[in-house]
Image: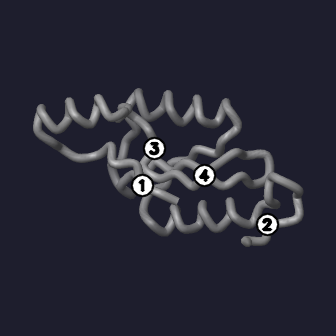
Amino acid sequence: MYHIPNEGKRSVVRGAQMKREGLKKGVPDICLPVARGRYHGLYIEMKRRRDGRLTKEQEKWIERLNRYGNKAVVCRGWEEAAQAIGDYMKEAAHHDGEGVPEQH
């Protein structure tokens, strides 16, 4: 699982550098690149419990990620995010439907 550093204010120079490095507006905040059930991975857009609104770019990314076989959700607060991750990980593993594969 990893965080995608899209939020926050930054200088024009740093913003341009990050854009050259691949920064995309609206990409969800958290990615869990583990296949479960019918999904390829889980993406979470974090919002404040109150007044947290999606931008048009965020709405487009969430719709697109869901359309292409991922599970993309909006969570309001860390508790919702923890629940979403727990529920997602309970789904059968995508590779064979038997759960988490052994690690070697």
Q: Amino acid at mark 1?
A: His
Q: Earlier in the sequence, mark 3 or mark 1?
A: 1
Distance between mark 4 and mark 2 Cα atoms: 15 Å
Rendered view: 75 above or below 11: below
CA separation, marks 2 and 1? 24 Å
Q: Would you call the spot at circle 4 few (<14 residues within 10 Å), some (14-19), or many (20 or more)?
A: some
Identify the residue at horizontal 48%, vertical 32% (top origin). 59
Q: Secondary structure at mark 3?
A: loop
Q: Which mark is residue 28?
A: 3
In the picture, the disc for residue 68 is none
Crowding at mark 1 (Cα within 10 Å: few <14, some 14-19, many 20+): few
Q: Which mark is residue 33?
A: 4
Mark 2 → mark 3, Cα distance in angstroms: 27 Å
- In space, the residues marked 3 and 1 are separated at their CA atoms by 9 Å
In terms of sequence position, does the residue under pointer 2 or pointer 3 come before the other? 3
Q: CA distance from mark 4 to mark 1?
A: 11 Å
For label 2, the SS is loop
* Residue 62 figure quarter: top right
Q: Earlier in the sequence, mark 4 or mark 2?
A: 4
> Residue 101 lies in what quarter of the image?
bottom right
Which residue type does callout 4 highlight? Pro
Q: Residues within 10 Å of mark 3 (few under 14, many from 20)?
A: many
**According to the image, label 1 marks what residue?**
3
| Marks 4 and 3 in Cβ contact (< 8 Å) | no
Residue, x 64% and y 45% (percent of image)? 71
Mark nearer the viewer, 4 or 3: 4
Q: Closer to us: mark 3 or mark 1?
A: 1
Residue topped by disc 2: 101
The label nearer to you, 4 versus 2, is 2
- 3D distance between C-alphas at marks 4 and 3: 13 Å
Residue 14 screen position, x and y as percent: 16, 38
